[in-house]
Amino acid sequence: MQHRLGIIVCLFSISTVLLTAAPVSSNRSDETIPRLKYEAVPDFFQLPAGENFVEVAAVAINSKGHVYVFHRGKHPLMECPHGPSGC
């Protein structure tokens, strides 16, 4: 029992040291954060009733403008031939 308590105290001490160690940050005032050249559009896709994207892994667009969405839902690969207006 006393051996277990010693192990618990040791693990607690190690985890406390690791969690309280502050990350070293550098002040690089000469670097600027680049602006991303896109704008978020709410409700972009109009999915059929009862369909949802689940954990989207990839999105691709072919030369005809068809949008393909690979996700972990019921239908893992969804093609939206009309772009955002209908899948």
Image (cartoon, rainbow, N blue to C red):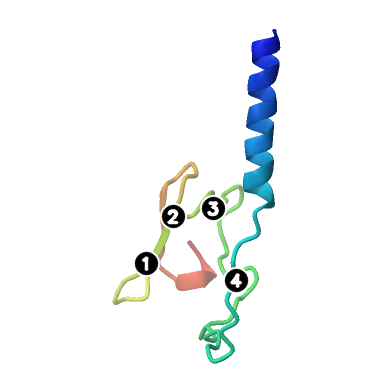
Q: Left or right: 56 with respect to 42? A: left
Could you say which disc has been placed on residue 60 in the image? Answer: 1
Report the residue marked by disc 2: 57
The residue that appears at 53% across and 88% down in the rendered structure is 31
Q: Quadrant of the N terminus?
A: top right
N-terminal label among 1 and 3: 3
Please indicate, yes or no, whether residue 68 appears anywhere in the rendered image: no
> Residue 46 in the image: x percent, y percent?
57, 64
Q: What residue do we see at 58% from left, 70% from top?
A: 44
Q: Position of residue 2 (x, y in %)?
A: 70, 11
Query: Which label was assigned to residue 47?
Result: none
Q: Residue furthest bottom?
A: 30
Q: CA distance from mark 3 to mark 2?
A: 10 Å
Depth check, front residue: 40 or 30: 30
* Residue placed under numbered mark 3 in the picture: 53
Answer above or below: position of 26 versus 59: below
Location of mark 4 (residue): 25
Q: Residue at x 65, y 54 (%)?
A: 21
Q: Amino acid at mark 2?
A: Ala
Sort mark 4 into few (<14), some (14-19) or many (20+) by Cα contacts within 10 Å.
few
Question: Mark 1: which amino acid?
Answer: Ala
Relative to residue 52, is residue 65 depicted above or below? Answer: below
Residue sitting farthest toward the top = 1
User: Along the horizontal axis of the image, is 75 left or right of 6?
Assistant: left
Q: Residue at x 61, y 76 (%)?
A: 41
